Amino acid sequence: MAEDFVIRDATGIADADAIALAHAESWRATYRGILSDAYLDGPIEDERRRLWRARFAEVPAPPTVAAWADDALAGFACAFIREDPHWGSRIDNLHVLPKFKRQGLATRLMRTIASRLVDTAPDVPVYLWVYDVNAPARATYESLGGMLAERAPRTGADGTAAPALRYTWPTPAAIGAGG
């Protein structure tokens, strides 16, 4: 049964802490074999909590949206506006927790974070990185019109490197415009 999700802007320490726990859970479920077991089974929650609290303390904080199913965080997305002079704004995180997958939530989160970028940087290109082995995420980005721009190794939070793909869109409005 599909959940009824409420997507809203994420703000404050409570949201930062909920996102940090969801981020850790998503990485444990998705990135085992990419990130080290020592990292995934060890300090990931504390490290993600520090990262998200720091992000939300920035002025302005990066646009971040969170999807809720009742009181449970189901997923989130975060972007950095005009991060790269060539590639544009970067969507740094898009995560849907395992029990909420296959309900169209990743697409909804992508479109919502794209709308935040339309509000702030409408003519700036958008890009993201995804690990090569993450076929479901790649399929989502391709269904939203993402164009594969390059393949390169990316160093994860634990220091390990793995092949990744850069997907791009010419503007935030182009994300999902065709579907």
Image: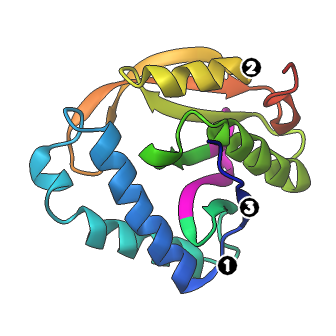
Return the residue nearer the eye: 157 or 15. 15
Report x, y in % for residue 159: 21, 46
Label 3 amino acid?
A: Val
Q: Quadrant of the C terminus?
A: top right
Establish if 68 lies above or below 17: above
Where residue 29 appears, x then y in whole percent?
A: 31, 43
Query: For residue 145, which numbered disc appears in the image?
Result: 2
SS of the residue at dot 1?
loop
**Reading the chain from its start, which is encountered first: label 3 or label 2?**
3
Could you tell me if residue 54 is visible in this image?
no
Q: Nearer the viewer, residue 141 or 70?
A: 70
Residue bounds of the magenta highlight = 73-90
Residue 15 or 173: which is nearer the viewer?
Answer: 15
For the stretch drawn in magenta, the main secondary structure is: strand
Picture quarter with the N terminus: top right
User: In the picture provided, is 171 more to the left or to the right than 8?
Assistant: right
